[in-house]
Structure formats: structure tokens, C-alpha cells
Image (tube, rainbow, N blue to C red):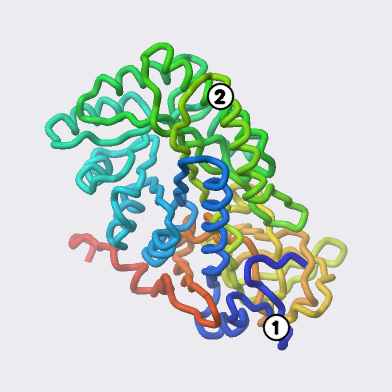
Amino acid sequence: MLLLGTQRVNEAGHLEIGGVDAVQLAVDFGTPLYVMDEVALRTRCREYLAAFRSRYPRVEVSFAGKAFLCSGICPVIRQEGLRLDVASGGELYTALRAGFPADRISLHGNNKSLEELEMALDAGVGHIIVDNFLELGRLAEMTRERPAPQPILIRAAPGIDPHTHRRISTGQVDTKFGFDVGSGAILEAVRRASEMPGVKLLGLHCHVGSQLLDTECHEDSVAVMVDLLASIRDRFGIQFEELNIGGGLGIRYLPSHQPPSVDGFAEAVIGRLTAALDAAGLEYPALLLEPGRSLVGEAGVTLYTLGGIKAIPGVRTYVSVDGGLSDNPRPALYEAKYTVLTANRMNEPHDTRVTVSGKHCETDVLFPDIDLADPQPGDTLAVLSTGAYNYAMASNYNRFRRPAVVLVADGHADLLVERESYDDLLKNDRIPERLL
């Protein structure tokens, strides 16, 4: 049985997370419910820092907030010594309002609006990751009269195919992100940026994809990026201060998923990086990483209450839960698979084959052909490894209210996000006077 972080089976035969009974969490906070394991998250942050800093002289780890961001998670990330990446004005605003230091925030995005760029510049963010020539031109105008130059990185598309799901691949040639390496667009971007007085070009950024279960693509992208650093040195006489290699390390959604340990990941990446830098005769730049899923993914559990059961003889048995597409769109988007447990009967055999569906007016099959303890209405189902991209992608489809989020640690549960009310669904609605 796959159990992660602080998860265990308690004396009542229930799943326990962070010292809190999952069944009691469902009673106290309702379902669907996102549960975040604080100890698991903090442990993972420390693993990253220790693994990379023990092998390389200058390393900064940034949490890719797109995976899971709310006000209450920002202090945890800050306390663990990590930076923070944001990918929109909303994520930036959340981080700033939560008191996260602006100079430790990096802003991403392939089509940043003028409003987002202005917010970042006014706040004094640590980096703006520049994605295209339009953005470079806008920054040239927007920074012209500012007293201090804005630090930037140029995002490269290294031309690496990560062999992951096509919708979470980002580093190949055919991608909307970054300046292409093979065509020379990245060199033109570096030339233009280096001549802009209002920015301080610190280095390069890349990202190859997500949910990668080996180190091959990261090693290959590091080699490409070091070759690029050498080309920039030879052509422009510039040795960059920073190299950001993104994130993308996978997690355990199923027992069969065996991603590298953080230590193994660091060993492979740093080994390839230092060998390439030494061969090129380059000074060692500061190394930046942006894990998202691999920090928060396994720390998250989603709890549901099982409802109706429909057996179709000779076909399948459907069991329905009180959520679905609106709180977990990933099965529909990526055919994502998960480990699902009967949280209130953990010691019973999970040997009844069912298909778990949601309750939306949609064919929202969540978890096809999985095994549960003999399903009964009222059971609490626990879906593991839902800390990344579940809450972040939640919607109000069918006017569902987005679930609450709780943080558990040492036997305590604290609300991070309240469950939306029906009034919340209507707060931005307007009826024109002429229709009344």
C-alpha cells in the first residue's frame, strides 16, 4: 500500500495524515477537502536545499507557485529558505499580500500583460523571466526612467523532447515558451537585452517539462544550456551570473511510479553540469531550480464522500463521489492516474474493482478501474498525491463551490482556504437594469 509523508493507518483502522484522522477531517471540514501535510512539504524543501548545496557552490531553490499557491503556504516556503516563482498577476498579488519578500520572487509568463509587468517592476521582484521579443520591447520602454535596472533572465527553448504527456511538455522546439536555441533567436534576445540600460541581464532560464521519472532530459538540457553559455561568452564576451534549469521532477501517483530521489536527481544534474562547465572553461554560475509538483504533490490528499453506486452486470460498477471535474480536472486533461484508498476502512482488503465518477453534469470519470474496500455510501475516499495542480486548477463548473484547504501537522488542522459559499458564487454577478 502506498503511503506518503506522515500518512499511516491509526488504531481505528483509518487513514491518518499529520497526526489527524482523515475521517474526522471529513466530518469537521466537509468534503471534497484538500489536505496538505506540512511536515511532508517542509521535509521536501530541506531535501532539495541539502542535496544541491552539498554538491554545488551557489544554489537557490524556488517553489513554482503555479503548482499550489495560497496566502498561507507563502510563510512555509519563506521559512524554509526558498524563493518563489509566480506565473500571473494573481499569483504575484497573493505572494505580496502574504508578505513574501519581493526580491525573492520571479515572474514567469509567455504573454505578460502591461499590468503584470508594472506590478512586478513596482514591487521590485528579484527576476522577470523574459519569454519573447514583445516583452523585451515593453521592458525597454517601461524601465527607461526607473532609478534601478530590473534583473531579468532570458528563457530558452533548448529543443529537448521530455517524452512526457504532450500537454506538459515545454522544452521542445515546438513550444510557445521561450526563445529557440537552434534557430539563434536566443542569441538575438541576449544581444538586445544586453544593450537595454533599464534591465540587468543576469543569465538564462529553461524548463523541459513535468512529471519526469528519470534524469535524462534534465542532464541533456544542462548540456545544451552550457553550450549556449559558451556561445554567448565567445560571441558577446559575457559570462552570465545565473543559470536556471527549471523544475519537472516527477512524483509517486501510483506505486509503480519510481522517480529519482532528490539526492539522486542532484547527483546526476550537478555531475553533468560541472563536467560541461569545466570542459567549456566557464566560471560556475549560480544555479537556480524551480520544483513545484515535486515539493507539494505528495504532500496533498483529497478527501471525498462516496454516494451512489451503479452496478452494470458484465460491464462495470460506478461509484460516485461528491466532487469531480471541478476539483480535479487532471484526469480529463492528462488522463492522470491516482492511488485511491478507502480512508475509513484501511485494514480491509481493497479488492473490489470499481470506476469512480464525479457528480457533475458531465462524463467526469475520475479514477477508472481501481480497487477499493467493498464500497458503501458514506465511505471516505482518500486520493493521494493531489497537492499539485488540483486546488490550483479548481473551477466552479456547474456552479460547484471550490473546496476548503486544510494544513495538518502534529495532530492539528488549520484552514488555509475556506470552502466557498453560495454567496461567493454570486458576488461578481450583475443583472442589467433593463432586465429587471
Q: Which residue is mark 1?
A: 10
The tag earlier along the polypeptide, 2 or 1, is 1
The answer to whether residue 312 is visible is yes
Closer to the eye: label 2 or 1: 2
Q: Nearer the viewer, residue 239 or 378?
A: 239
The amino acid type, in three-letter code, at marker 1 is Asn
User: What whole-number distance in Å separates the C-alpha atoms at marks 2 and 1?
Assistant: 52 Å
Q: Nearer the viewer, residue 216 or 174?
A: 216
Vertical arrangement, residue 31 with respect to residue 141, above or below = below
Which residue is the site of mark 2? 278
Q: Going by the picture, which residue comes out furthest to the right?
A: 314
Q: Decide: few, some or many residues near mark 1? Use Cα within 10 Å; few <14, some 14-19, many ≥20.
A: some
Q: Position of residue 170 (x, y in %)?
A: 53, 34
* Res. 293 in view: no
The location of residue 255, given as percent across then percent down, is: 76, 58
For this orientation, the residue located farthest to the bottom is 12
Estimate the x, y position of residue 127 in percent, counting from the top left. 33, 40
The circle drawn on residue 79 is: none
- In the image, taking residue 198 as reference, residue 60 lies left or right, namely right
- Kind of residue indicated by mark 2: Asp
Residue 316's image quarter?
A: bottom right
- The C terminus: image quadrant: bottom left
The vertical placement of 252 against 32, above or below, is above
- Which residue corresponds to the image point at 83% horizontal and 75% vertical from the top-left? 349
Quadrant occupied by the N terminus: bottom right
Q: Hey, which quadrant is residue 431 in on the image?
A: bottom left
Residue depicted at 13% across the width and 36% down the height: 147
Pick the residue in front: 285 or 392.
285
Q: Nearer the viewer, residue 262 or 313?
A: 262
